[in-house]
Image (cartoon, rainbow, N blue to C red):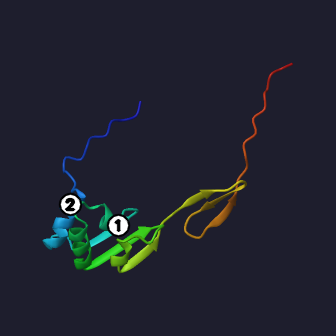
Amino acid sequence: MPRQRSRDPVKGLTLVEIMNGVQNSKINAMYVQGENQAMSDPDQVHARKALASLDHLVVQSIFLTKTAWFAGVILPGPRMDRGKDHLLCGLCDRKWLGQTAAYRSCSAG
């Protein structure tokens, strides 16, 4: 039986609370991975002003999002694509050859 993990008693911040913290100078740097805060905040003007006021913003995504336009550093995000006989993995699109599993009946006959 898996061990039950207790929840962290400290509540995290919502996106709106994070953007308020940026505008109130309580947050001055952010690392964003796979999100698009410039578009997902209910008040996009507020979010974009907040993102523009950050001292440092790093965005990691496979897409050049609206949030990435505010970033000082943009990192490529990981991706995984499946082809017919290969698997493209990671940031450099290396091909890993894959094999389809073949199942045989082992019935004694």
Instruction: Please state which amino acid type lies under the numbered disc 1.
Output: Val
- Residue 69: x and y in percent read 37, 77
Q: Is residue 56 above or below residue 104?
A: below
Do the residues under discs 2 and 1 have CB atoms within 8 angstroms?
no
- Residue 107: x and y in percent read 80, 22
- Residue 105: x and y in percent read 78, 28
**Figure quadrant of residue 88:** bottom right
Q: Is residue 57 above or below residue 85?
A: below
> Number of numbered discs present?
2
Q: Is residue 70 above or below residue 37?
A: below
Choose the circle earlier in sequence order: 2 or 1. 2
Q: Residue at x 75, y 35 (%)?
A: 103
Position of residue 81 in the picture relative to residue 56 (left or right):
right
Mark drawn on residue 16: 2
Q: Residue at x 25, y 80 (%)?
A: 55
Position of residue 46 in the picture relative to residue 1 (left or right):
left
Residue furthest out toward the right = 109
Q: Quadrant of the C terminus?
A: top right
Q: Quadrant of the N terminus?
A: top left
The residue indicated by pointer 1 is 32
How packed mark 2 is, by other alpha carbons closer than 10 Å (few <14, some 14-19, many 20 or more), is: some
**Figure quadrant of residue 81:** bottom right
How far apart in space, not on screen, are marks 2 and 1 (Cα)?
A: 15 Å
Q: Which element type, helix, strand or loop, lies under badge 2?
A: helix
- Nearer the viewer's eye, disc 2 or disc 1? 2
Residue situated in front as seen by the camera: 66 or 19: 66
Q: Residue at x 29, y 78 (%)?
A: 56
Instruction: Please state which amino acid type lies under the numbered disc 2.
Output: Val
**Figure quadrant of residue 57:** bottom left
How packed mark 1 is, by other alpha carbons closer than 10 Å (few <14, some 14-19, many 20 or more), is: some
Q: Residue at x 23, y 70 (%)?
A: 45
